[in-house]
Image: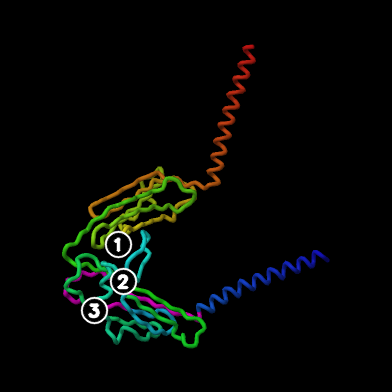
Amino acid sequence: MAIKHKNILFAAFFAFLASGVVNLFSASATYADQNPIHLQVSPVKQKLSLDPGSSYVSSFKVQNVGTEAFNYSTEAVPYSTTDINYSPDYSSISTYSQISQWITFDEKLKSGHLEPGETVDVPFTINVPKDVPSGGQYAAIMAQTEDGNADDANIRVVNRVGMILYANIPGNTRAEGSVIDNKVPGFLFEPPITVTALVENTGNIETTAEYIFKIWPLFSNETVYNNEENPGTLDIMPETRRFSTISWDGAPKLGIFTVEQTVRYLDQESTVKKLVIICPIWLLFIIIALIFFMIFWLISRARSRKRVEKEATN
């Protein structure tokens, strides 16, 4: 009878747990269904060349790619980064983010309402002052929306996305910098194989670094990964350092490969090529244990042989 009651208790517990999981997913689905607000802008980046004292007119698209109508608004904010991982900063104003103050919008389209599937072109004008410094200027044009049913909704959903403006003012510009670091690992406990690099821009205009990543099996000349035809690229802003990573997720859990990364930046090229071993930690422990066992066995055998030889001479 005790066993029967125990089984009933276990069944009740698992039923309660299962219902909780179902309710969790149901709540997530309900939350998603109640807030199908999806805002998108395009393009995500524009590169411009601006002359002092000139005006530049362009536009970007604000799109409703969700299933719920919403109201949108736009604004221009400064754009910079705070660390080598390029965490964005949309509030700090510097010499390189003055352009955010030169941007004006068409008042009729600066804000509005979008039904699902609708897209609007939002024009903007950049009025460049005559006395601006030469070099790079960076800003983000942001679009923001709130839940179309925000007045009577229990949950508010705010979406904010932006387009980055990279602008250069001609004149006394400097494209300077260097590859600070280029690393390929030598030993890994598990995949993926990841290479890293650090590039520094010491000039006053934005520049671009190129990253080529190649991998060969130990006894083969044919690459299993090679992005040379479509190398990775990253924009490096003035007076910043940018850290990069490239990974090959197709690596097996055990293997030996030749790995090469080439970083091209300005007139420099840095190449690092290494033999990379992937070995699970449990297998490494087994190998170490076997090595110690073999050493112990050889020492013991040598001592036994010396003892036998000593006894034979006596």
Percent position of residue 181, x then y: 34, 50
Percent position of residue 54, x then y: 17, 75
Q: Which mark is residue 235?
A: 1
Q: Nearer the viewer, mark 1 or mark 2?
A: 2
Q: Amino acid at mark 1?
A: Asp
Judge left or right: residue 277 versus residue 300.
Answer: left
The residue carrying mark 2 is: 78
Q: Residue at x 35, y 82 (%)?
A: 73
Q: Secondary structure at mark 2?
A: strand
How far is the residue under mark 1 from the one under mark 2? 17 Å
Percent position of residue 245, x then y: 38, 56
Percent position of residue 240, x then y: 31, 59
Q: Amino acid at mark 3?
A: Thr
Residue 6 location, quadrant = bottom right
Q: Between residues 134 and 11, which one lies in front from this camera angle?
A: 134
Q: Between residues 222 and 234, which one lies in front from this camera angle?
A: 234
Disc 1: CA contacts within 10 A as few (<14), some (14-19) or many (>=20): few
- Magenta residues? 33-61
The residue carrying mark 3 is: 125
How far is the residue under mark 3 from the one under mark 2? 16 Å
Q: Earlier in the sequence, mark 3 or mark 2?
A: 2
Residue 168 location, quadrant = bottom left
Q: Which mark is residue 92?
A: none
As displayed, is residue 271 above or below residue 21?
above
Q: Residue at x 63, y 18 (%)?
A: 308
As displayed, is residue 157 above or below residue 9?
below
Judge left or right: residue 66 versus residue 102.
Answer: right
